[in-house]
Image (tube, rainbow, N blue to C red):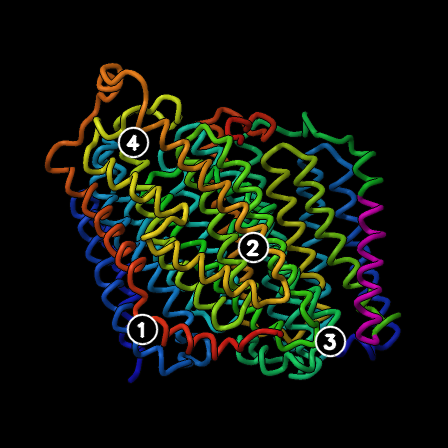
Amino acid sequence: MFAAHLSPLAGSLFSLLAITCLLLAFVMLGSRWLNAYLGAFALQSWLIALLSAAVAYYGGYPELYGIAALTALFRGLVLPYLLLRITRRLNVDRELHERLSPSASLVLGGLLVLFAFVVANHLSSALGLAGTVAVLALTAMLSMKLIGFLMLVVRREVVSQILALLVIENGIFLGSQILVPGMPLLIELVILFDLLVVVACFGVLVRYLVVHAGTTSTHELTRLVG
Amino acid sequence: MNPAPLLDVILLAPLAAVAGCQLIRSARFAEYLNLGASVAVFAAVLRLLPIALGGPYILLDGYIIVDPLGAWVLLSCSAVYLLASVYAVGYMRALGEPRRLHRFYALFAGFALTVMLGPLMNNIGVYWIAIELTTLVSTFLVGFEKTREGVEAAWKYIVIVSAGISLALLGIVFYYWTASFHLGPTYNLTWGALRSVAPQLNPTLALAAFLLVFIGFGTKVGLAPMHTWLPDAHSEGPAPVSAMLSGALLNTAMIGIVRFIHVTDAVRLGVLPRTVVVVIGALSLAIAALFITRQTDVKRLMAYSSVEHMGVMTLGFGFGGPLGIAGALYHMLNHSLNKSLMFFGSGDVLHAFRSKRIGRIHHVLLAMPVAGALWMAGAVAITGAPPFGLFLSEFTILRAGLASPNAWAVYLMLVLLVVIFIGFLNHFRAMYFGESAAAAAATARWRPAPGERIWCELPMWLALVPLLILGLWWPSAFSHYFSVIAAQLGGGIR
């Protein structure tokens, strides 16, 4: 596995990018404004594209340059644009009914990162990779996953929920770039397009929600119980 | 013999139906086109069954696999697609929205296509995408009636299932990572490749990966505690869609879990992964028992019954061994037929009484004598009473459990099945027999026109008669089929 023998420069570059992505997840967790979420998400996607390019350069996987370009294009531009269109139509620019205040969710998010680190450390030492960039990649991957789930739980605007799912996806993508850079190109491409279709479907559903349920807050989706 | 031409039929017929429905925007044309596609798919799957026995065949550069297990799941799915397509003709006409119907059938055929794709996928990443596609298409079917509840159900469905399935993606990345230490950085992650390298995998990482994919695809199967989307989606979709969700979609996700169990058996992990599977299966049964007993909505009752039967199937696969696998596979077919019948019946009741509340449904037999009787027979069958197929399959699973290391689950399963039997049939007692017959006749305002009735009753006959036959006679051809599948899946861990 290539993460085990990296030059120190490459290792610290990867670490820097992974940690910045994780920090951007915290920006989303700590804010109430949908625009802040969107900006953080777009920036995160650009950083992941940068990471793909760096892995391509240091690891010798030329096809990852293509992935990097597509990531920047789709995750960095198209998805934020689609989400921006959804938000514009909604006349909602902030969370009103979050279940947990941003500061409390930040603390909880910190604990989740701690948990993710413990799991990541355990897994990597089982593989004899303790102390390498793999630990960091796993930590970032798992904590973005957990933070995404946390956002799904505490946020109630539909746009925040879509973004929470996208943060989860970003986390998996980020980790897989470092851990399994050789993943067949086809799979990565299909997953990218799949994401596009998912967001398009969400867009249509949001319109249904506005028209037929008269709300964009899951706070009011409480008809179906039991 | 080469299975490729049959696969073309199975995949291209629904695709052609999608295109045809979108091009010619006529409701009448669309319903017959979809019906034709479903007949073609079912016939092709019947032909595929004996051919697949010689498999596994790997086609299209390793992306498609035709094996007995996949063919069996295809049989269950295509049977439901056929029945639901027949039923949809009558049910959707009665809905009275002819201008949107072509879109319904386009989505319906597209949904069937994605469901058929799953069992055929050999590359695990592509299998994940097939499962994701089923969600995206069926969300719009769930919300098709565009009621407030329907849209709410569609939203919860897509969010919960997308979140769950992302766990499965993480698990697949883990599998890819741990296998890449042995197969090199770039390779195709197929079921066969993963299985062959499984004995060398790192146990810690393989266990984490298995738990992730089990929870992830388990969300899609509707296993507790990730089942919460299921009652909403099943109860709010139109009846043919509910039947497809319950009888076809859940099986497509189940096959992934079965294949991952097969992989994990070869990792040096002992009995732990199977115990996890059994515990989650038993938990699903327990949750279903509680919600069935206290249910007030007839379609949610059916939905929780799906959670129950997915739990039973998971127990069967979790117990493993030739008997457990045979029981679970037999249960899959029986459940698909039976649950279609139940959703068709609840669709008729919804039309007749204009309500899904059990408390507002009385004297079903007076309102619809034939369909009511069929529905009642189906209710007896789905609780696992003889002489229907589910009795045989549940009994086989119980026997398999006694021989497995997790025999405790057998006793729990027995108790819960009895609770469900009482709770489920008690609701039917309330709906069929009540105090005043005159008031009941007044509540039944709607009767299907004679021309429509055949569309509603024919699929119920088509589901019940095989169910009865399968309960009285376990065909020896099936036994042979199951033993081949069990041999390919290995006997499990003893």
Given residues A2 and A114, the one toward you in this image is: A114
Q: Quadrant of residue B264?
A: bottom right
Q: In the image, what residue occupies the spot 53% across and 47% down? A: A199
Q: Earlier in the sequence, mark 2 or mark 4?
A: 2
Q: In the image, what residue occupies the spot 40% across and 80% down? A: B59
Please give the residue where the numbered disc 4 appears in the rendered image: B349
A179 sits left or right of B35 in the view: right
Kindly identify which chain the residue marked by label 1 belongs to. Answer: B
Q: Earlier in the sequence, mark 3 or mark 1?
A: 3
Q: Can you say whether B190 is above or below B360 in the image?
A: below
Q: Amino acid at mark 1?
A: Ser
Q: Secondary structure at mark 2?
A: helix
Q: Earlier in the sequence, mark 2 or mark 3?
A: 3
Give neighbour class at mark 1: few <14, some 14-19, many 20+ (Cα, 10 Å): few
Q: Amino acid at mark 3?
A: Asn
Please give the residue where the numbered disc 1 appears in the rendered image: B476
Start and end of the magenta stretch?
A109-128
Q: Could you tell me how far apart the alpha carbons at marks 1 and 4 are, in whole angstroms?
A: 37 Å
Res B325 label: none
Q: In the image, what residue occupies the spot 69% across and 70% down? A: B206
Please give the residue where the numbered disc 2 appears in the rendered image: B218
Q: Amino acid at mark 2?
A: Gly
Please give the residue where the numbered disc 3 appears in the rendered image: B202
